[in-house]
Amino acid sequence: MNAMDPLTFEHKTLAAGQWVELSFAEQMGNIGSEVHRAPKWHIQGNQKRFQGAFERALELFDLTIGSSRQHPTRLKEVLYGRYEFCDYFLGNKLNTDPTKMQRYYDQFALLARGNR
């Protein structure tokens, strides 16, 4: 199967085209939901839930990165966010604070909610 085939995604309707219809703020806010869950389950030692949240977050990052309408600055921001998210769980060389990481994504969720 192709890596971008909607059948390989957990978020099948989003992968099938719904994701690109969302605003950047909505996309980042949705990413933030999974970014919030992954450290929570990791800290609590729930490997199954952590793995699910981690994979869903990467999926949403990748859908955003694959969106053809991303401005280069936004693309760089999403790529760095994905890098920072992964780094947190793979040694945390960036010394990322999960609370600060979550606050960053919360701002997008608030912005998206305000634009409805």
Image (cartoon, rainbow, N blue to C red):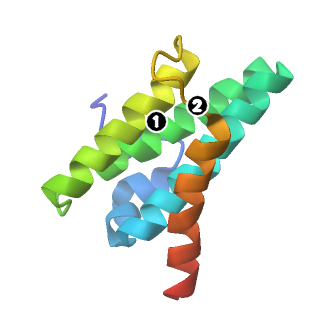
Residue at the top extreme, as displayed: 91
- The amino acid beneath tag 1 is Leu
In the picture, residue 47 is in which quadrant?
Answer: top right
Residue 72 image position (x, y, % from top left): 14, 54
- Residue at point 38%, 29% (across, down): 83
In the displayed structure, 28 sits above or below 8; it is below
Identify the residue under disc 2: 54
- Residue at point 47%, 25% (across, down): 86
Q: Assign the N terminus to one quadrant of the image.
A: top left
**Local crowd size for mark 2, using a 10 Å CA cut-off: few (<14), some (14–19), many (≥20):** many
Left or right of residue 55: residue 77: left
- Residue at point 52%, 40% (across, down): 57
Residue 66 visible: no
In the displayed structure, 77 sits above or below 91; it is below
Whether the residues at callouts 2 and 1 have beta carbons within 8 Å, the answer is yes
**Local crowd size for mark 1, using a 10 Å CA cut-off: few (<14), some (14–19), many (≥20):** some
- Residue at point 43%, 68% (across, down): 25
Residue 44 image position (x, y, % from top left): 85, 25
In the displayed structure, 50 sits above or below 68; it is above
- The amino acid beneath tag 2 is Phe
Q: Quick one: SS at disc 1?
A: helix
Identify the residue under disc 1: 58
Q: Quick one: SS at disc 2?
A: helix
Camera-nearest residue between 94 and 54: 94
